[in-house]
Image (spheres, helix red, strand yellow):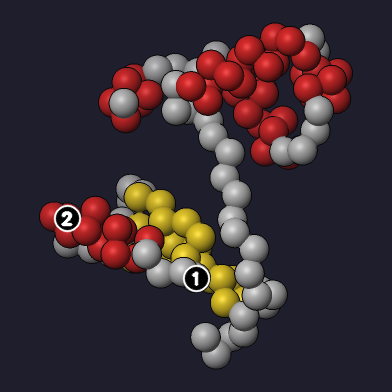
Amino acid sequence: MRSSVQDQMLKDDDLRLLNALQIRPRASWSELSRAIGSDPVTLTRRWERLHSQGIAWIAAYRGGPIVSATALLEIECAPAQTMSVAEQIAHDPEVLTVDLTTGNRDLLVTLTCTDLDQ
């Protein structure tokens, strides 16, 4: 599925919807329709298509102790080890996200802790 998603070009209307949802993720379709200039039913259909194609998704994190420290870790790996390292890191309960990237780093990890010592 990954290769078919990468080959697709998003339309301007799709990009406007995704940007609006990034800015106001809890906005109703009616609120978004006024901001974007498209009716709520169209926005709903567009979201369903983007979601079903794996282009857009909703993420939520399980509640837990109060978080007072968040860190972004940039990690470099041997090319053949990137997926293995990402899978191992993803099992850590303090890790929120593990993103595979290009450029000077291979992984970008977001983690949270209850204090700076952790």
- Residue 25, image quadrant: top right
Q: Residues within 10 Å of mark 1 (few under 14, many from 20)?
A: some
Residue at the spot of label 1: 94
Q: Is residue 86 left or right of residue 40?
A: left
Residue at the spot of label 2: 79
Q: Is residue 83 left or right of residue 58?
A: left
Q: CA distance from mark 1 to mark 2?
A: 25 Å
x and y percentages locating residue 87 in the rendered image:
29, 58
Q: Nearer the viewer, mark 1 or mark 2?
A: 1
* Residue at left offset 53%, top offset 16%: 49
The amino acid type, in three-letter code, at marker 2 is: Pro
* Residue at left offset 44%, top offset 62%: 109
Q: Is residue 52 above or below residue 77?
A: above
Q: Is residue 4 above or below residue 99?
A: above
Q: Is residue 34 left or right of residue 50?
A: right
x and y percentages locating residue 100 in the rendered image:
35, 50
